[in-house]
Image (spheres, rainbow, N blue to C red):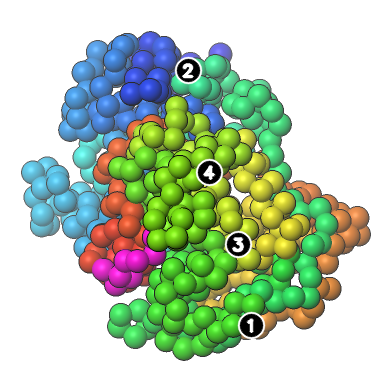
Amino acid sequence: MSKEQAAGEGTPPAVELRGITKRFPGVVANHDIDITVGAGTVHAVVGENGAGKSTLMKTLYGLHRPDEGEILIGGERAVLGSPADAIRYGVGMVHQHFMLADNLTVLENTVLGAEARHGIGSGARARVRALSDQYGLNVRPDVLVEELGVGDRQRVEILKVLYRGARIVILDEPTAVLVPQEVDELFANLRELKREGLTVIFISHKLDEVLRVADTITVIRRGTTVGTVDPAATTARELASLMVGGALPVPELRESTVTDETVLELDGLRVEAADGRPVVDGVSLRIRRGEIVGIAGVEGNGQAELIEAVMGIRPAAAGRVLLRGTDVTGRSTREIREAGVGFIPEDRHRQGLLLEAPLWENRILGHQRERPNAKGVRIDAAGARADTRRIVGAYDVRTPGIDVLADALSGGNQQKLIVGREMSGDPAVLLAAHPTRGVDVGAQAAIWDHLREARAAGLAVLLVSADLDELIGMSDTLKVILRGRLVADADPATVTPEQLGSAMTGASGPNGENGTAGTDAGEGPEGPEGAADRSDADGTDASAGTADRSGPDDADAPDDKDDRAGSDGAAGTADPDGPAGGADSGSGQGSEPGNGGAR
């Protein structure tokens, strides 16, 4: 008897999805899906990009109406025409992209839209405190959301769902932006929810985490269920095989390609918030030809602002940005792009794509004056269309054609299109913010392969990622950022994700020593010997000891519009200080009030 069967003995399942089919123009997102979720269990749903996971969960949450099949909740047939219907049945959903207003308190965010339940005063406050204590969420009702880290923000999202009376909680990629310590805290919260009799549906790509927390795992492949397994009787490798028909990819750099030629240099770079507070404080580093420099940090510690300053999206208050010895500080984003810098933004919806435009037009974004997209001053539609077909083939962008709107692709396929676009044209430098966020294990491996090939050809890469295994495995040089300063260097050949996560929070150094916040990492080692051959270190491969994992997010076609704000930023022309929540290139300024939501 499985854990789920035992948990549900004598009671109807919390959720039954029977023969669910959902079609969109040119796409069958779900086909004859059957899933049974036991009451009081954690049920994981895994699958590759475009497999249909997010579409299925949005159907359960009332965002989509199924074309065929039925939904039973607690043994009762449910017709869900909207999220309000789902909430009435006790179903709540925590989206991967947090839906919180930075300039409101935790209490105000929780009550917003549910004022009729407990009012907006003492009754609401008492209910928030009671739920926080009951489920071990440790939220502070009067703190502004802008002051919270990502782990705390996620707990607020869970609290919002519970406040609305949910007994079934859907979590979409909940660990995508968390460091290992925050993942442990989340899993403790999930166990508390389960102890209180709630049911959790957990959507993830990170197979090692799924195996840790789930009672039952359902695998979806190409829109239909291919198996339901007991975590105690399977492995991450077997799950990966069910998902994509192959082995789990491992991020690793087998040999050093680092030269002594500096391509990108930052010299004392300082970036300030609107109130004059430094969000990037005196950062100096060099990236050499054939080198990947990884930046590890809890989101909101300045890594996004650092990349935006290099890209010309944000102004530098002090310091210099030098590209192949030329000072490009203060140049426009277009000029920096044309000088040979590619940019994979952290938020593909707001900075990387025009969601209501076809794929071939998205290929042009940010590269409007370059071949094959242009002939002289005119757009070359034929050239752009031909190159889009090349990218779709080379990067395995799963789409019926290049005239499909970007909006119709799953989140992972959108990301692959962006990576292909930014890797085109032989850039000298690539600024890569979470390049594999939202892609499945197969696409993740392909992106790593493309990065390795470009690195071997001389590309210099600045890599920011919330996936610590990716940072460790794909970096020649690894630095830790905390409160806008580079505070420590880590050796990718020896550091563990746990040590790196601890250094990111300032609890200890990357090698386990106490305290990093007062340590200046400086510019790191001089010359190519600073990045030793990854197959050295006493014969230990750089990837040894890293956990099995896969990429984060999946937002199957079409994504719901609630977590989007448009995407003007790919062209690099918008005002980085634009209105809150707008489609500006400077979005994602998580530490500032009213700047478009949490990271």
Q: Which residue is drawn at 76% across and 57% down?
A: 456
What's the distance in space between the residues labelled 3 and 4, CA to CA?
Answer: 16 Å
What's the distance in space between the residues labelled 2 and 4, CA to CA?
Answer: 32 Å
Circle 2 or circle 3, nearest the eye: 3
Residue 572 magenta: yes
Image vertical order of residue 66 relative to residue 260, above or below: above
Secondary structure under badge 3? loop
Residue bearing the label numbered 2: 224
Circle 1 or circle 4, nearest the eye: 4
Residue bearing the label numbered 4: 387
What's the distance in space between the residues labelled 2 and 1, CA to CA?
Answer: 53 Å
* Of the pair 124 and 295, the residue shown nearer to us: 295
User: Residue 325, labelled with which disc?
Assistant: 1
Circle 3 or circle 4, nearest the eye: 4
Magenta part of the chain: 571-578
Residue 547's spot in the image, x, y percent?
Answer: 68, 45
Specify whether residue 222 is in view. yes
Image vertical order of residue 226 relative to residue 466, above or below: above
Which quarter shows the C terminus?
A: bottom left
